[in-house]
Amino acid sequence: MQLSPTKRFCKSSTESYKKPYLIPMEPAIKMLRTQRVPIFLLVDSIRHSEEELSISLRVLRDIELLGRFYVFDNPIAVNSFLLKHDFLFNAIFEAYKHLNEIFGAGVETHLKIHNDPEEDFEALFIIVKSVLPSDQSLNLLDRFDEEWWLDVDDEIRKLIEVDVENMP
């Protein structure tokens, strides 16, 4: 079964819903339950499968899907940020895919909001929790930057930071 290709970046998450989908939602979910297919391979199909959904429901579905990949350190703050910046969804899903390729499948990832009211700055941090030694984790983060992150649109990188934290 063929999946629709992942669209690299969109100015708005609503643009990504305009392309046709190849797997309806129910068969995609059934595939997740019956086969050992990594969920991020089916995200594109699940996200684009129900054209009749309103844009706000699609955003809520995307937030729900992100919750399968990331731990929301402060769910209310993360959800609020994502609702304000819905054009970030594709980049966040793509980041997870690339982090899994570089750090290994099943890497623990978190979404965390950082606020600096004095600077009027708010950003979403993607935190990779690593059990590897610090130098090895930082080398993998550098590889992630070089292979993918530095090619991401500047507007997206202004709102999202990717960092590594070592777990004991």
Image: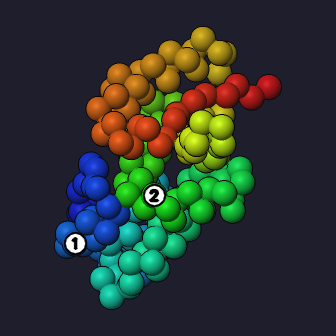
Q: Position of residue 60 (x, y in %)?
A: 51, 73
In the displayed structure, would residue 52 be above or below residue 140?
below
Residue lying furthest right: 168
Three-letter residue code for mark 1: Lys
Find disc 1 in the rendering and name its residue. Answer: 18
| Mark 1 secondary-structure assignment | loop
| Mark 2 secondary-structure assignment | loop
Q: Quadrant of residue 14?
A: bottom left
Q: Position of residue 147 (x, y in %)?
A: 33, 26
Local crowd at mark 1 within 10 Å, few (<14), some, or many (≥20)? few
In the displayed structure, would residue 13 be above or below residue 103?
below
Q: Is residue 12 visible?
A: yes
Please state, as top left, top right, bottom left or bottom right, where the N terminus lies in the image. bottom left
Find disc 2 in the rendering and name its residue. Answer: 85
In the displayed structure, would residue 135 be above or below residue 65?
above
Please name the residue shown 58% across and 42% down the image: 120
Q: Nearer the viewer, residue 33 or 84?
A: 84
Horizontal relation, residue 99 to residue 115: left or right = left
In the displayed structure, would residue 85 be above or below residue 61?
above
Q: Nearer the viewer, residue 115 or 113?
A: 115
Local crowd at mark 2 within 10 Å, few (<14), some, or many (≥20)? some
Residue lying furthest top: 135
